[in-house]
Image (cartoon, grey):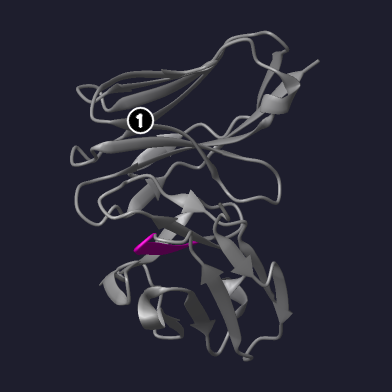
Amino acid sequence: QKEVEQDPGPLSVPEGAIVSLNCTYSNSAFQYFMWYRQYSRKGPELLMYTYSSGNKEDGRFTAQVDKSSKYISLFIRDSQPSDSATYLCAMSGVGGFKTIFGAGTRLFVKA
Amino acid sequence: EAGVTQFPSHSVIEKGQTVTLRCDPISGHDNLYWYRRVMGKEIKFLLHFVKESKQDESGMPNNRFLAERTGGTYSTLKVQPAELEDSGVYFCASSLTGQAEQYFGPGTRLTVT
């Protein structure tokens, strides 16, 4: 079993839709939860960062962490064609910050 | 402020040859990480430097891989000799002391033929 499970998609939505992306994990030691966005042939770009459980909002993006269920989510409101990319969930524990990544979900937002 | 830079962007070498990848972290970031993504797989951790010291090298696949960070600034990752299964994209990331958020470079695409 992988430490982090993420549906690779692809996920296709119309412009303006609310997008929900999620990951589950098995290691209860994870404390830091990140979402990265990666465009084709580029490096991962840090989008959202959350420590422990709770919600965090930044513009059209909301990250949620439920440690009791070992489940994290990223919501994108009013999705735009420019949001089309691969979204990677990532997490790490305390100490060295070795980061474990999900497989990434490929998102297409159609105009 | 300049981000993480990596060189070269793409390298094609033959099996058995040696390749050296370079990473320049964001200025002031003591933490430097190497990751790798092979075809169809997740991004996997290779190792973590704090300044010039190796903090965690549990992800290094075998002794054909050698990472260095002399002086605690840029880092190199040498593969010698390269094998076909080493093909993939090698990412470098850096972070400030005590910060979990890591900032990634654009990656080096390594193709071993």
Residue positioned 52% across, 53% down in the render: B104
Residue positioned 51% across, 31% down in the render: A7
In magenta stretch: residue A75: no
Nearest the eye: A68 or B72: B72
- Placement of the C terminus of chain B among the 4 image quadrants: bottom right
Q: At label 1, which amino acid type do we have?
A: Thr
Q: Is residue B89 visible?
A: no
Q: Main secondary structure of the magenta part?
A: strand
- Residue B61 vertical placement versus B79 (above, below): above
The magenta segment = B29-35
Q: On the image, which quarter does residue A25 sit in?
A: top left
Q: Say left or right for A56 vs A109.
A: left
Rendered location of residue A96, percent (x, y): 25, 57
Rendered location of residue A54, percent (x, y): 27, 19
- Residue B83 vertical placement versus A31 (above, below): below
Residue that protrudes farthest toward the front in the picture: B1
